[in-house]
Amino acid sequence: MAVTSQIGTSYTQGGLLLSDWQAGGLLKPSAVKPVFATLEQRLILSRLGLLSAQDQNALRTAIRGVLG
């Protein structure tokens, strides 16, 4: 799922504001968009951060909401 620092005032179903973005090493307040995508491993240049346990659990819940 896509992570963005472009945070609007409203999110569609499945969007998630990250609560621990600083602890995860992200540079700005961030959110996960409800968009699924796959990338080839060679296209990933670096890791920008990690999700905290709290944000991981919230993301699992959001994914369940999107996929039903």
Image (cartoon, helix red, strand yellow):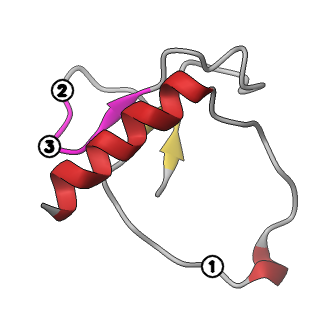
Amino acid type shown at disc 3: Gln
- Compared across the picture, whether 13 is left or right of 20 comes to left
Q: How many marks?
A: 3
Contact between labelled residues 1 and 3, with CB atoms less than 8 Å apart: no
Residue 10: give its label.
Answer: 2
In front: mark 2 or mark 1? 1
Residue at mark 3: 13
Would you call the spot at circle 2 few (<14 residues within 10 Å), some (14-19), or many (20 or more)?
few
Q: Nearer the viewer, residue 55 or 14?
A: 55
Q: Residue at x 29, y 41 (%)?
A: 61
> Does residue 5 appear in this view?
no
Q: Nearer the viewer, residue 6 or 55?
A: 55
Q: CA distance from mark 3 to mark 1?
A: 23 Å
Q: Residue at x 20, y 34 (%)?
A: 11
Residue 53 to residue 63: above or below: above
Q: CA distance from mark 2 to mark 1?
A: 27 Å
Residue at mark 1: 39
Region in magenta: 11-17
Amino acid type shown at disc 1: Leu
